[in-house]
Amino acid sequence: MNGLMTISQFSYPTSIYFGEGASKKIPEHFRALGLKRPLVVTDRDLGALPVFETFMKGLKAGGLEPHAYLGIFGNPVRSQVHSGVDAYRQNHADSLIAIGGGAAMDCGKVIAMLITNPGDLFEYEWSKKPIQNALPYIVAVPTTAGTGSEIGRASLVSDDQTHQKKIFFDQKLLPRAVYADPELTLGLPALPTAATGMDALTHLMEAFVAKGYHPMADGIALEGIRKVAKYLAPAVSFARTKIGATPEHLEARKEMLAAAMMGAAAFQKGLGITHSCANALTTYYDRLHHGLANGVMLPYVLEWNASAAPEATQRMAEAVGMRDTKGLVQWVRDLKKQIGIPEQFQDLHADEARIQKLAEHALADGCTSENPRETSLEDFKQLFKKAISS
């Protein structure tokens, strides 16, 4: 021994109430804490659906006085967060419920932050300004199985003008409880089911090969990959045929919810350049879904990283029933085809100048340093050229 020791820090998340009907327990939970007036933060699309109306009625029937904030749409931006803070104060709220996909979760967490910590949102980017005061009580209710933001200590919010993504990271951002109810995901259409599922798979695979030592994250990641392999395609198939609350559909949605949270737990270890590329793409193409961007980039990055993480790549291949790296990459491509994720990006119109900008952005992304294989500017350019249809 050389006398030197590397100390790794492990941290795992919050209380999770998981299973069919879990969300119906929220009023009881809030009443027990003496809370009555939650601000319910969600995105505009979900807010227009019957499932949200039913959710709000359930809160009211349980004795709460909720107010809905529906100001989230697209990739979340700073102005949406500040408007949410205004809504909280104007409605004399005493708590928050973030319900929806990653955008609603991310906004809900930083809305809570700004309610008790003064200043502009971007002052708190990547802990530049510490979060000193405790946040209002917040719970998270996922309606998609992708980001796992419900159990995350981070939020991602963009600048309104530049679309540059800003990261906010602090233990205080972790929701105090999660209500993961597969019944709330049954009506998710096929394409967002597929895109969010690919987001979860990317989290799991990138975490497993990321630099660093985190055996708990590795174990969770590998089991999460197995769940996606078994349940994502059926979930998309049920969404296409509009199958209701059958036991088989509920099982697929339930296991994908679990896989998404497992991905978020696992990527405490780190991520990689699939996310670097996706973050660049969704900055320059604001309407591009983050999960779709990850899904398109994933097989190209798996091929690129295989030489730097051969053992981990082999174990992932075995987890999905394949023999080797080539089989793993083909499995991902076959899964994408089955669920409707394209092999390449279509209609992005990326000329050489745009490829250069995308590569520069990806190179500077925080996930790049966690990738198992060193990736240069020219390497990023080649990855983008492969993934963007000419």
Image: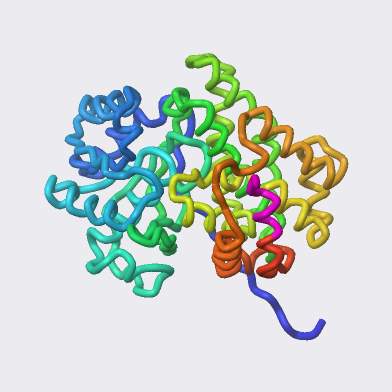
Q: Where, quadrant-wise, is the N terminus in this rendering?
A: bottom right
Horizontal arrangement in the rendering, residue 146 relative to residue 325 (left or right):
left
Query: For residue 47, what is the image quadrant?
Result: top left
* Residue 365 appears in the picture as rendered: no
Residue 127, quarter of picture? bottom left
Q: Identify whether 369 is placed above or below 342.
A: below
Relative to residue 94, is residue 283 depicted above or below? Answer: below
Q: Main secondary structure of the magenta part?
A: helix
Which residue is more in the foreground, 10 or 315? 315
Residue positioned most to the right: 323
Q: Does the magenta stretch include residue 165?
A: no
156 to the left or right of 145: left
Q: Residue furthest bottom?
A: 3
Give the percent coordinates (x, y) of residue 364: 56, 69
Q: Is residue 378 visible?
A: yes
Where residue 107 sits: x, y (%)? 34, 51
Residue 210 or residue 83, whichever sits in front: 83
Give left or right: position of 119 versus 90.
right
Q: Is residue 231 above or below residue 266?
A: above
Provide residue 272's location: percent of width, then percent of height. Answer: 64, 59
Q: Residue at 21%, 43% (x, y): give it.
A: 35
Camera-side residue of 296 and 217: 296
For the point 66% across and 53% down, which residue is it?
Answer: 206
Q: What stretch is highlighted in magenta?
A: 382-390
Q: Which residue is drawn at 20% across and 34% down?
A: 64
